[in-house]
Image (cartoon, grey):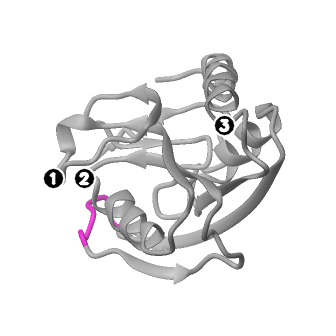
Amino acid sequence: MISAKAIAARIEALAKEITDEFSDTQQLVVVGLLRGSFVFIADLARELDLPVEVDFMEVSSYGDAMESSREVRILKDLRGQIEGRDVLVVEDIVDTGHTLSNVIKLLKSRHPKRLKTIALLDKPSRREVDFTADYIGFEIPDEFVVGYGIDFAQRNRNLGYIGKVRFTE
């Protein structure tokens, strides 16, 4: 669906936009939402021409299912403080919007200076809550995808591209 080369080019362009927006920052806290964002956050962080601190949260709304449960659970919280700091939350895919919407509400309550979001993939046709990431890599149709950190039942995260899951009977 999306080649490794296309992903790399898009990340480079997004990193330039983010670098420009946060050019005045003392340090950008880049928060990856585990597990799906780990490949994206690594590549994005290397492209940012800014002082960067990396932290992670682990949230769950899928488990091993193909459908979101719409119940967002925080499995691992940030280690560091974000009050008064510039924060960029990195997500692999925005589907229903419940995960990022809930995470952003939580992080806003911690009073960051600026709080922005980036998603590698966006499925606006699936949105159930009014949420749009500040930066979007690719808009995709309502397909179940894997690769580049995104899994199905913990498989196919290691693919260097984004591919559609095909089910056979």
* Mark 1, residue position: 128
Within-10-Å neighbours for mark 2: few <14, some 14–19, many 20+: many
Which region is colored magenta? 65-70
**Residue flagged by tag 2: what amino acid is it?**
Thr
User: Rounded to the nearest whole Å, what is the CA distance between mark 3 and mark 2?
Assistant: 28 Å
The residue depicted at 67 percent of the width and 25 percent of the height is 20
Q: Is residue 5 visible?
A: yes
Q: Amino acid at mark 3?
A: Phe
Question: Residue 82: x percent and y percent?
Answer: 63, 69
- Whole-percent x and y of residue 156? 58, 49
Residue 145, label in figure? none
SS of the residue at dot 2? Answer: loop
Foreground label between 3 and 1: 3
Labelled pair 2, 1 in contact (Cβ < 8 Å): yes
Circles 3 and 1, Cβ within 8 Å, touching? The answer is no
Q: Mark 3 and 2 residues: CB-CB less than 8 Å, in contact?
A: no
Residue that carries the numbered disc 3 in the rendered image: 22
Q: Quadrant of residue 38?
A: bottom right
Q: Is residue 63 visible?
A: no
Mark 3 residue element: loop
Nearest to N terminus: mark 2 or mark 1: 2
Residue sitting at 71 percent across and 65 percent down? 55
